């Protein structure tokens, strides 16, 4: 599969920002910024395509992935990837789910959106994909080895403590809701109706 080019809102950058580097994943913009004492300093931001992460529900289980990629040790993840330039985030989520798992979902619920870094324009979108059914085989990129596994809700919660779980934003979210029984119950109902 062709590497996605950036799709993001560069209007969040100052009008005088100039792109000084264009990569396959990251672009770097720089600009002169007026400081409080009247001097100027060189500021920069990284821009990258937004990403999607999907929590697929199959009956009463959650699908996770054991994954390998070049230059990475084995890690645990959820299906997901970059939003292509011609896609909205839900379309990208549906595409990534079918490519990485072979499953389609009957119902999609937006869980949250985060922007994890101040110096980077990049949003991470999280969806719950309920009532998933297998319709295809996996269609993986040449740099992916992915084994899908089904786990229980309780096992899913414990991923927040597993250092092999790659999604630190979701791990933090899960740790926070684990402290509040009412939030935990609401999350469980979102996943399983």
Image (cartoon, rainbow, N blue to C red):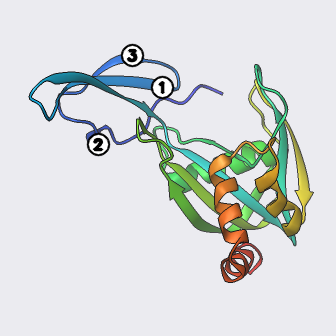
Q: Which residue is mark 1?
A: 26
Q: Is residue 135 visible?
A: no
Between discs 2 and 3, the one toward the N terminus:
2
State the SS at label 2.
Answer: helix
* Disc 3 and disc 1 in contact, CB within 8 angstroms: yes
Looking at the image, how many numbered discs can be counted on the residues? 3
Against 7, residue 105 (above or below) is below
* Mark 1 residue element: strand
Find residue 177 and report its horizontal and vertical position in percent.
Answer: 67, 70
Neighbourhood count class around disc 3 (C-alpha, 10 Å): few under 14, some 14–19, many 20 upward:
few
User: Left or right: where does residue 63 sit relative to residue 173?
Assistant: right
Residue at the extreme left? 38
- Residue 90, by quadrant, is bottom right
Q: Residue at x 47, y 41 (%)?
A: 117
Residue at which label 2 appears: 12
Percent across and percent down for residue 93 are 62, 52
- Identify the residue at horizontal 72%, vertical 63% (top origin): 105
> Crowdedness of circle 1 by 10 Å Cα count: few (<14), some, many (20+)?
some
Q: Position of residue 42 (x, y in %)?
A: 25, 21
Q: Secondary structure at mark 3?
A: strand
What's the CA distance linking mark 2 and mark 3?
A: 18 Å
């Amino acid at each position: 599969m062709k590497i996605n080019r950036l799709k993001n809102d560069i209007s969040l950058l100052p009008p005088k920002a100039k792109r000084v580097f264009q990569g396959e994943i990251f672009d770097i913009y720089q600009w002169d910024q007026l400081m409080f004492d009247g001097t100027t300093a060189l500021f920069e931001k990284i821009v990258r395509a937004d990403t999607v992460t999907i929590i697929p529900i199959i009956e009463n289980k959650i699908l996770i992935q054991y994954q390998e990629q070049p230059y990475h040790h084995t890690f645990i993840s959820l299906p997901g990837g970059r939003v292509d330039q011609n896609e909205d985030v839900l379309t990208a989520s549906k595409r990534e789910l079918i490519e990485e798992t072979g499953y389609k979902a009957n119902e999609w619920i937006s869980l949250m959106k985060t922007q994890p870094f101040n110096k980077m324009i990049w949003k991470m979108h999280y969806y719950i994909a309920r009532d998933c059914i297998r319709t295809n085989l996996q269609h993986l990129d040449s740099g992916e080895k992915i084994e899908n596994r089904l786990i229980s809700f309780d096992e899913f919660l414990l991923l927040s403590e597993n250092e092999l779980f790659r999604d630190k934003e979701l791990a933090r979210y899960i740790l926070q809701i684990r402290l509040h029984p009412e939030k935990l119950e609401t999350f469980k109902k979102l996943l399983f109706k």
